[in-house]
Image (cartoon, rainbow, N blue to C red):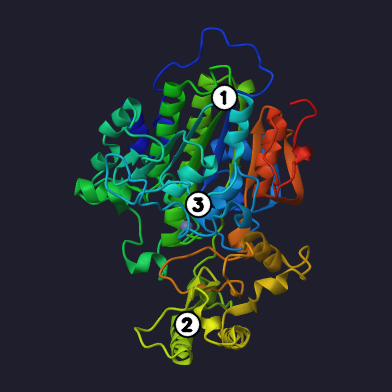
């Protein structure tokens, strides 16, 4: 029952190893590492590692102190959301090549229903090409992968299209979809049977450290729509509702890590003579960051907990798989922009940008030009700064001069406060991609056949109008992520050259001595590898 304690404990330090994992005699050091661990922390900002000196003492602190740390690493594409970010980390390719351009066009798949729980079906059917696990599998068909997350997209996309052990959280239990299998394995069922999220009903999230350790105000007017803004944050007394709210607390990360460790033990990952992959995506930082903002006391407390959880997780991995056999990578799927209201409160010019009225007007004008006899069409849809034309060629065929439509629309959008620029994707090819990060990120994002005639970029500090702090733009705030390699074959240190999340897969392929897939966008970060891994 140790996992149960870990999941709801106020500190993971209370988590003792559940089972004595080490073999009596450690196996000889193999030619290549036996377990690759990809940790993606949803919305983790690189600055968190240094923001609270002396307070990070666990796994995060350890990875940053002992690893190869890339200080200028980016999810270097435009729509910095969870699905495209997770699709880059182990594929080595940009969204324009993975086909995963936003969450809405991510993993949703009605043909792949969930097992044993109601919720949206999901699969990697939209993901194009291969990823690291396919390369490992091509070198050794005995290789296995386990990928776990609170989110379907966080679990699915790091392993590409591979039908491996892939599990995510839905309404209090971990599940998978029929894309992967027809029934849940007994170890996942047994894990779910502990009902940890349900039994967390009425529990309170309190501060880990003394109140004086937190410089942030506990309450700010923009937090959580004004509800439940101060500690302690109590889960609902109803167990079903508690299991839903549990997904937005620090404890979901502890539970996800516990499932990962259970799977490593059950599947004997890293102990079978092959090189296996464990991918873990942790989502609490994203939920808490959206709700309270990245400068909140809640994010501070959660990162302290995440740090302790990761200490426990790494120690357990080292106990089960010899330390010399491990390589760990830590990154994030995206950053975040603080609430514009918080920026304004500091005297910074910032806008909550809404274009719904303008887009509705343009759709009505196109209806009038098309002389639509039917219900008004939504010819243009704005999503993540991308304007999608969904007319099936009818507007052009009706003689409507689309070029002038785009020119006029761009001019109107440019006048909206908070809008930095509006680009025609075709024009971006001429941009200086070294100095113009926005152009570079859009080029990395958009396949030429996507049907996106315009892209809109907001100014720094501004955001699309939401009730929560958000990400998804091609800004440094949303694109800058931590990137740390740690373990076998890694040369520790700080590396200040520009790196990107598409560099992770080719770097791991080199470290593991496997052939990468074709046409990668990333490069091998050879500076962070020892000469003979
Ligand atoms: Zn998010």
Q: Position of residue 166 (x, y in %)?
A: 44, 37
Q: Which mark is residue 126?
A: 3
Specify whether tag 1 is near ligand 1 (CB below 8 Å).
Answer: no
Q: Position of residue 294 (x, y in %)?
A: 51, 59
Separation of marks 2 and 1 at Cα, in angstroms: 51 Å
Query: Which residue in the protein does label 2 denote?
Result: 359
Query: Which residue in the protein does label 1 denote?
Result: 141
Q: Secondary structure at mark 2?
A: helix
Above or below residue 4? Residue 90 is: below
What quarter of the picture does the C terminus occupy?
A: top right
Of residue 430 and residue 434, the one placed in the foreground of this image is 430
Which tag, 3 or 2, sits closer to the chain's start? Answer: 3
Separation of marks 3 and 2 at Cα, in angstroms: 28 Å
Q: Position of residue 488 (x, y in %)?
A: 67, 27
Q: Position of residue 328 (x, y in %)?
A: 60, 34
Q: How many marks?
A: 3
Q: Which mark is residue 214?
A: none
Whether residues under marks 3 and 2 lie with C-beta atoms below 8 angstroms apart, the answer is: no
Q: Secondary structure at mark 1?
A: loop
Which residue is farthest top? 24
Q: Secondary structure at mark 3?
A: loop
Q: Residue at x 30, y 30 (%)?
A: 189
Which tag, 2 or 1, sits closer to the chain's start? Answer: 1
Q: Is residue 331 left or right of residue 528?
A: left
Please tell me how crowded label 2 is: few (under 14), some (14-19), or many (20+) other residues with Cα within 10 Å. some
Q: Is residue 127 left or right of residue 182?
A: right
Please tell me how crowded label 1 is: few (under 14), some (14-19), or many (20+) other residues with Cα within 10 Å. few
Of residue 132 and residue 59, the one placed in the foreground of this image is 132
What quarter of the picture does the N terminus occupy?
A: top left
Q: Is residue 221 left or right of residue 342?
A: left
């Amino acid at each position: 029952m140790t996992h149960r304690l870990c999941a709801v404990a106020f500190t993971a330090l209370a988590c003792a190893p559940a089972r004595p994992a080490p073999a009596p005699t450690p196996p000889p050091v193999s030619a290549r590492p036996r377990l690759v661990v990809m940790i993606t922390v949803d919305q983790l900002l690189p600055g968190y590692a240094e923001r609270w000196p002396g307070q990070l003492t666990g796994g995060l602190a350890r990875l940053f102190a002992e690893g190869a740390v890339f200080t200028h690493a980016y999810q270097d594409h435009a729509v910095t959301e969870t699905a495209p970010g997770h699709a880059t980390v182990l594929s080595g390719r940009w969204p324009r090549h993975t086909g995963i351009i936003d969450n809405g066009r991510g993993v949703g798949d009605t043909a792949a229903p969930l097992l044993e729980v109601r919720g949206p079906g999901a699969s990697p059917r939209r993901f194009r090409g291969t990823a690291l696990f396919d390369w490992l599998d091509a070198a050794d068909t005995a290789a296995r992968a386990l990928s776990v997350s609170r989110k379907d997209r966080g679990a699915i996309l790091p392993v590409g299209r591979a039908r491996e052990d892939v599990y995510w959280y839905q309404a209090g239990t971990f599940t998978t979809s029929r894309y992967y299998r027809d029934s849940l394995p007994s170890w996942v069922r047994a894990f779910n049977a502990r009902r940890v999220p349900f039994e967390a009903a009425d529990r309170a999230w309190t501060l880990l450290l003394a109140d004086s350790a937190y410089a942030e105000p506990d309450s700010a007017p923009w937090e959580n729509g004004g509800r439940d803004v101060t500690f302690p944050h109590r889960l609902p007394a109803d167990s079903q509702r508690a299991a839903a709210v549990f997904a937005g607390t620090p404890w979901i990360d502890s539970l996800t890590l516990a499932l990962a460790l259970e799977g490593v033990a059950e599947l004997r990952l890293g102990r079978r003579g092959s090189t296996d992959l464990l991918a873990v995506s942790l989502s609490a930082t994203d939920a808490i960051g959206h709700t309270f903002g990245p400068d909140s006391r809640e994010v501070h407390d959660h990162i302290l907990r995440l740090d302790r959880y990761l200490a426990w997780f790494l120690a357990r991995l080292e106990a089960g798989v010899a330390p010399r056999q491990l390589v760990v990578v830590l990154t994030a799927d995206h950053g975040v922009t603080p609430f514009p209201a918080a920026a304004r409160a500091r005297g910074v010019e910032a806008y909550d940008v809404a274009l719904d009225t303008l887009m509705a007007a343009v759709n009505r004008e196109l209806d009038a030009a098309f002389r639509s006899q039917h219900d008004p069409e939504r010819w243009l849809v704005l999503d993540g700064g991308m304007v999608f034309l969904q007319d099936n060629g009818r507007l052009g065929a009706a003689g409507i001069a689309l070029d002038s439509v785009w020119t006029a629309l761009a001019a109107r959008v440019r006048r909206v406060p908070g809008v930095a620029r509006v680009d025609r994707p075709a024009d971006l090819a001429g941009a200086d991609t070294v100095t113009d990060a926005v152009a570079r990120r859009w080029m990395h994002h958009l396949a030429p056949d996507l049907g996106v005639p315009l892209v809109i970029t907001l100014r720094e500090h501004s955001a699309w109008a939401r009730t929560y702090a958000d990400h998804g733009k091609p800004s440094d705030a949303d694109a800058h992520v931590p990137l740390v390699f740690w373990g076998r074959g890694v040369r520790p240190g700080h590396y200040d050259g520009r790196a990107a999340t598409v560099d992770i897969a080719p770097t791991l392929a080199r470290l593991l001595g496997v052939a990468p897939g074709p046409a990668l966008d990333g490069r091998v970060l050879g500076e962070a590898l020892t000469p003979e891994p």
